[in-house]
Image (cartoon, rainbow, N blue to C red):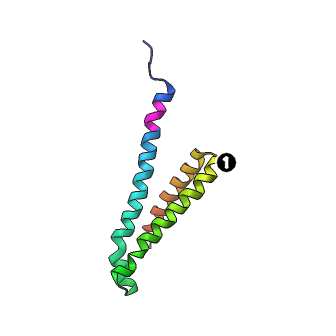
Amino acid sequence: MTNNVTPHKANKGIITFIIAFGIFIWSFSAGIVTIALPSISQYLDVSTSLVSWVVVAHLLVLTSFLLIFGKIGEYVGYKKIFLGGLFLSQLDHIFQGFP
């Protein structure tokens, strides 16, 4: 009995999962910032409308890094850049939970 699954087809599912996981982490990060807005507003004693700029700044930084590291990925390799960014993102989320 032969296995009809080629390595390319086997990797396709893994690659799709990894990309979907990366998109989930990006959305999760934006959601965390949005949920934290009332606490940030109360802590800094400013209006919620003023603190809403935090979300804009957060997404602007993420998008800027996406463009910069996309260009670096052309030279270094997309896989290395993606995995390095995913690792740093997870490390960041772990340390955000500690005071």
> Which quadrant of the view contains residue 96?
bottom left
| Predominant SS of the magenta segment | helix
Say which of 33 and 89 sits in front.
33
Instruction: Give the x, y percent position of residue 50.
Output: 39, 81
Q: Is residue 76 above or below residue 11?
A: below
Residue at 59% from the left image edge and 55% from the top image edge: 69
- Identify the image quadrant of the N terminus: top left
Instruction: Give the x, y percent position of residue 81.
Output: 58, 50
Q: Is residue 81 above or below residue 58?
A: above
Instruction: Give the x, y percent position of residue 52.
Output: 38, 75
Name the residue beneath numbered marker 1.
Answer: 75
Farthest bottom residue? 45
Say which of 17 and 49 sits in front.
49
Kind of residue indicated by mark 1: Tyr
Instruction: Give the x, y percent position of residue 23.
Output: 42, 52
- Please report the bounds of the magenta region as a residue range: 10-14
Say which of 3 and 71 sits in front.
71
Q: Is residue 8 above or below residue 40?
A: above
Q: How many marks?
A: 1
> Which quadrant of the view contains residue 32?
bottom left
Q: Secondary structure at mark 1?
A: helix
Query: Callout 1: few (<14), some (14-19), or many (20+) C-alpha neighbours within 10 Å?
Result: few
Farthest right residue? 75
Residue at 63% from the left image edge and 47% from the top image edge: 74
Residue at 51% from the left image edge and 53% from the top image edge: 86
Say which of 14 and 69 sits in front.
69
Residue at 33% from the left image edge and 69% from the top image edge: 35
- Identify the image quadrant of the C terminus: bottom left
34 magenta-colored: no
Q: Is residue 67 above or below residue 58?
A: above
